[in-house]
Image (spheres, rainbow, N blue to C red):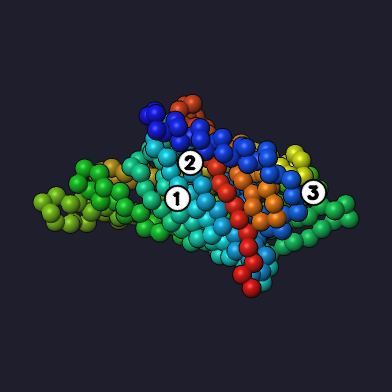
Amino acid sequence: MSTNKLHYIFVSLFVTFNLSGEYAKIINLQVEPNRMLAIPLPEVAPGYWMIGSGGGVFSIKEDCGFMGHLTIGFRGNTEIEFRTWEVLDSLFLTHRLALGSFKIKIKFLDLKDPWGRAYKLAWFTGRTFTSTNIRNYVKYVTELYKVATIFSVVSHRYKFCIGVSWDRAQVTADSLINFTQKRLYSLSITKNSVFSGVEVMSTPQVRSFLEVFSLPFVDYSPEGIKMSLEYFVVVGTRTILNQYFSIDTGIKYRIFGSVADAAIFFNINYGAKFQ
């Protein structure tokens, strides 16, 4: 790991944790990201609210990456999310990709029992914008589609979430030899997966998370393409700074991987009403 990368990691963590300890005093956060650190939640953004997030990912194996979210709520039961991020080689085992996605989430159920527990159910669908990967004079163009159902149980201090996801990868491969483009093949691959997470209100200002989920891994080769699921665990916290800001910090680790596959990440979240 280069000296510049180490400096970037330590400075970012120093700033993040000092902000968390020094300024986490105002606990009435009106709006938070409608996800845990990595997996979605059934909650949607309040009507006419905008939630933005931006941060970085630091991996021992590879360079730093950028993540960004923008979520807009409509009428209290629907939200639209735009997302962009860079895929790290250590996670997807392929060349670095800059990706973007568009997602719509609709909340169908929001009930409370006599003991104060809330039960929530939502559905979302999304599409990852086209990403291109060139290897050995072959250009691979991949589009990822996702449909998921999410259910959560929420009490005063705890939140449990579980979801089922259907992922489809549409991949085309073109040969670029001799400056001509020739279609080699085009195919569609689907996978189903389950994700879950637990959120604990450690203090009124801090939420702690433990999450397990999977991401599609597309193995490119001139002979063909295979899609499998890589499983990850995330541990981290969200610290509320004031009525509009919060900070996420955590570690993402690839199950069945090595210690070098661990990635440190942080996000700064901001909520604002636009009407």
The answer to which of marks 1 and 2 sits earlier in the sequence is 2
How packed mark 2 is, by other alpha carbons closer than 10 Å (few <14, some 14-19, many 20 or more), is many
Which of discs 3 and 1 lies nearer the camera? The answer is: 1
The answer to which of marks 3 and 2 sits earlier in the sequence is 2
User: Which amino acid type is shown beneath numbered disc 1?
Assistant: Trp
Pointer 2 residue = 57
Is residue 54 something that shows in the picture?
A: yes
Q: Position of residue 255 (x, y in %)?
A: 52, 32
Q: CA distance from mark 3 to mark 2?
A: 31 Å
Pointer 1 residue = 85
Is residue 42 something that shows in the picture?
A: no
Is 30 in front, or is 176? 30
Name the disc covering residue 155, or none. Answer: 3
Q: Position of residue 195 (x, y in %)?
A: 59, 45
Left or right of 202 on screen, residue 197: left
Residue positioned 35% across, 44% down in the render: 96
